[in-house]
Image (cartoon, rainbow, N blue to C red):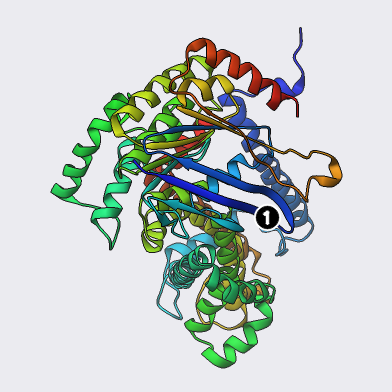
């Protein structure tokens, strides 16, 4: 549970401005859905929250402190793909975070301590419904199961912020709905602050307590490099009625699709 | 309706037959050629008959050599395998360390990677005289030739494989609190070992090449030494069985490493099957 404060953040690559003047205050225990057309910098924004990339200008504060210059265990992440370790079983993947925490030297536990950690992982594995697949390798799991594993793995160190980069983008619609339920349950139980990049507006509205859209104000070809995208919509969702949500969705959908 | 040829697959028995066919034809061609030459000149040494091949095998593989008191084939095999295995093990260990640090640590990569790339361009055989001068004509120079011959390839391959790893995995490990060392130990190494072993399998050919070459030039025992020694007497009846034996050894190495990989790294196999 963390307060995130983004002030006047810019991101440039080789003189090309990707993001500009991004300002955002996020309250603790918010679920921020991030939408926008392809190439609008929403994933770049997420990578900056992760410290995978640094802002060119401006600052990002978490609970008043600047972000560390590299990824840390306070910020968990689930990517669309390659989020889990292919050479570890489900149980080992989840236990990884605890093992590296408790064994600084070899990052691996043995004997009673290992059993203890594996037992501690049982609860979250059960919560994501992978009980029967504990000893399977990721390649033996379906796409949905792999993402559930990635979520369990990301939560084991109890991060304060969870970053999701199109986590359900590669899944079938039916499985997606299950994942949404799971995500909402975990969100309520953990008190996390979540940032989720998605292409799916419905998903953004369904899961988020707040929705932000990135887009460019200037879109002529000669302006693309000189002006970046920024936050064009910022919508609280928690108190909206289903009807308000539908209307807002139509409006944003229209704006986003217009590019 | 007849299917296209690209859609027709041989059954088990057919595959076995088709696989053996080229060998059978080769043996048949050899037998015919040998018989024709021996008919013209019974003392012909170029294509010895199967009987004289058998005699030669019995002489070198199953009876002690009257001059040295050892069974030649086994003494040669032991000497060659010792050099080969030593060279392979040292090259693999060295490449594992350097390949991994090159792949993982940008500062080390900036320093070492260009050097490895350039060293790998040196034809190892051109260095053999240097090795003989520096390390003498004994075992050491042969082992070093194998190491110099294959280690740069292994290092570069490993570095490239590590750089090919999805960046997401390294990021994920960091978000789970793993240090650089822990990431090497628990994420990079376990995934790279099977790939390194695959690369070693590919270097078996070059490794044998360097071994035989070094033995041909300076040695007093070894498979390469023997075939180059008996070449002076046109002893095809010894050379041919030796070549077959060397091929068989290389094949066994290759299969053993492949089995080892499948056995120790079951997740690789699982990944291949589902892919």
For image coordinates 48% across by 42% down, the residue present is A25
Which quadrant of the figure contains the N terminus of chain A? top left
Residue A243 in the image: state x and y as whole percent: 53, 10
Instruction: Decide if residue B149 is on the left or right side of residue A106.
Output: right
Is B121 rendered above or below residue A219?
below
Q: Residues within 10 Å of mark 1 (few under 14, many from 20)?
A: some
Q: Residue B61: image x %, image y %?
A: 46, 63
Q: Is residue B245 visible?
A: no
Question: Residue B57's spot in the image, x, y percent?
Answer: 52, 60
Identity of the residue drawn at 47% across and 47% down = A5
Q: Quadrant of the C terminus of chain A?
A: top right
Image location (x, y in percent) of residue B21: 66, 36
Tell me the subunit letter for badge 1.
A
A239 above or below B179? above
Q: Quadrant of residue B120?
A: bottom right
Q: Closest to the observer: B246 or A192?
A: A192
Q: Is residue B122 above or below residue A27?
A: below
Q: Residue at x 30, y 24 (%)?
A: A132
Most foreground residue, A157 or B264? A157
Q: Secondary structure at mark 1?
A: strand
State the residue position of label 1: A12
The outermost residue toward the left is A112
């Amino acid at each position: 549970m963390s307060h995130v404060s983004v002030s006047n953040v810019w991101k440039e690559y080789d003189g090309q401005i990707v993001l500009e003047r991004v300002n955002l205050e996020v309250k603790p225990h918010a679920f921020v859905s991030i939408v926008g057309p392809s190439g609008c910098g929403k994933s770049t924004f997420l990578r900056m929250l992760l410290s995978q990339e640094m802002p060119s200008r401006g600052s990002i504060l978490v609970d008043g402190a600047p972000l560390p210059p590299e990824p840390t265990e306070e910020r968990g992440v689930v990517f669309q793909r390659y989020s889990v370790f292919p050479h570890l079983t489900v149980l080992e993947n989840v236990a990884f975070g605890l093992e590296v925490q408790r064994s600084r030297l070899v990052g691996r536990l043995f004997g009673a301590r290992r059993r203890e950690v594996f037992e501690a992982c049982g609860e979250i594995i059960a919560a994501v419904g992978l009980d029967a697949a504990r000893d399977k390798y990721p390649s033996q799991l379906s796409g949905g199961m792999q993402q559930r594993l990635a979520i369990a793995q990301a939560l084991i160190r109890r991060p304060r912020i969870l970053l999701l980069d199109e986590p359900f983008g590669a899944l079938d619609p039916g499985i997606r709905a299950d994942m949404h339920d799971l995500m909402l349950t975990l969100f309520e139980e953990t008190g996390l602050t979540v940032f989720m990049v998605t292409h799916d507006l419905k998903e953004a509205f369904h899961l988020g307590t707040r929705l932000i859209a990135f887009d460019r104000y200037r879109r002529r070809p000669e302006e693309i490099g000189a002006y970046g995208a920024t936050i064009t919509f910022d919508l609280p969702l928690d108190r909206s009625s289903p009807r308000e949500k539908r209307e807002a969705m139509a409006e944003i959908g229209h704006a986003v699709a217009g590019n | 309706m007849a299917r296209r040829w690209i859609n027709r697959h041989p059954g088990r028995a057919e595959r076995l037959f088709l696989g053996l066919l080229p060998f059978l034809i080769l043996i048949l061609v050899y037998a015919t050629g040998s018989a024709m030459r021996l008919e013209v000149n019974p003392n012909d040494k170029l294509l010895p008959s199967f009987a004289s091949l058998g005699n030669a095998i019995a002489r070198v593989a199953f009876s002690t050599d009257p001059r040295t008191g050892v069974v030649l084939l086994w003494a040669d095999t032991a000497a060659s395998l010792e050099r080969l295995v030593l060279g392979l093990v040292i090259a693999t260990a060295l490449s594992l360390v350097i390949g991994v640090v090159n792949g993982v640590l940008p500062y080390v990569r900036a320093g070492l990677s260009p050097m490895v790339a350039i060293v790998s361009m040196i034809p190892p055989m051109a260095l053999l005289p240097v090795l003989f001068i520096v390390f003498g004509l004994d075992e050491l120079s042969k082992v070093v030739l194998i190491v110099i011959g294959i280690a740069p390839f292994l290092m570069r391959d490993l570095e490239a494989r590590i750089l090919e790893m999805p960046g997401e995995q390294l990021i994920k490990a960091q978000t789970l609190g793993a240090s650089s060392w822990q990431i090497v130990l628990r994420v990079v190494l376990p995934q790279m070992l099977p790939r390194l072993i695959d690369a070693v399998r590919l270097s078996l050919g070059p490794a044998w090449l360097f071994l035989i070459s070094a033995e041909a030039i300076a040695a007093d025992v070894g498979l390469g030494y023997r075939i180059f020694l008996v070449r002076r007497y046109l002893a095809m009846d010894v050379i041919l069985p030796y070549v077959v034996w060397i091929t068989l050894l290389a094949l066994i190495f290759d299969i053993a490493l492949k089995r080892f990989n499948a056995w120790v790294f079951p997740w690789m196999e699982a990944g291949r099957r589902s892919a």
